[in-house]
Amino acid sequence: MIEAHATARYVRTSAQKAGLVLDLIRGKDVNRALATLKFTKKSVAEDIAKVLRSAIANAQNKDGFSGDVDRLFVSACYANQGPSQKRVRPAPMGRAFRVLKRTAHLTVRVSERPEKVVAIAADTGAAPKRARTPVAKRPAKKAKE
């Protein structure tokens, strides 16, 4: 099973805002995740889509990749907090307020879904057993006296 990841560092957004969008694509297959990011109205969705495409390309370049991109899915994605830039904003009466311009490190990990192995049953010559269908029993109605 192939697993690849990609990381974008120092993206100019907070990790909390990026985490909201990453929650939308976690566990989805890569084509559905890219479609979800395309129609998401958050600006960080473009950066996440770029990282996801990079992770797909990294998986394709690994040895042992089957060549089928449709079998890839987003196995993990998270946003870690990066360094914050400290800035000063003028405030009334000669004071100054501190402004934190936050950054985030975005990581997307993709994995290949295992192929479904179908067991072939040996033919024993006997007819297959039929499954019993459960019958719902209703409580008996009591007669009024």
Image (cartoon, helix red, strand yellow):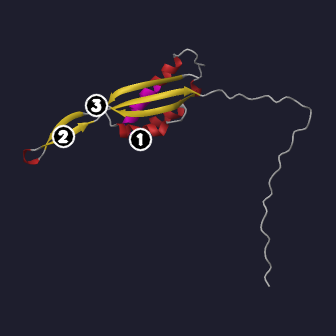
Left or right of 38 in this view: 14:
left
Q: Secondary structure at mark 2?
A: strand
Q: Residues within 10 Å of mark 1 (few under 14, many from 20)?
A: some
Residue corresponding to mark 1: 20
The residues colored magenta run 42-53
In this rendered view, identify the residue nearer to me: 52 or 142. 142
* Residue, far left: 94
Labelled pair 3, 2 in contact (Cβ < 8 Å): no
Residue corresponding to mark 2: 98
User: Which residue sits at x=52%, y=21%?
Assistant: 59
In this rendered view, identify the residue nearer to me: 90 or 32. 90
Cα separation between marks 3 and 1: 20 Å
User: Which residue sits at x=53%, y=19%?
Assistant: 60
Rendering quarter of residue 70: top right
Q: Secondary structure at mark 3?
A: loop
Q: Please give the count of numbered marks on the rendered protein.
A: 3
Going by the numbered disc 2, the residue's amino acid type is Arg
Left or right of 61 in this view: 113:
right
Residue corresponding to mark 3: 83
Going by the numbered disc 1, the residue's amino acid type is Leu
Labelled pair 3, 1 in contact (Cβ < 8 Å): no
Q: Earlier in the sequence, mark 2 or mark 1?
A: 1
State the image coordinates of residue 102 (x, y, percent, origin top left). 28, 35
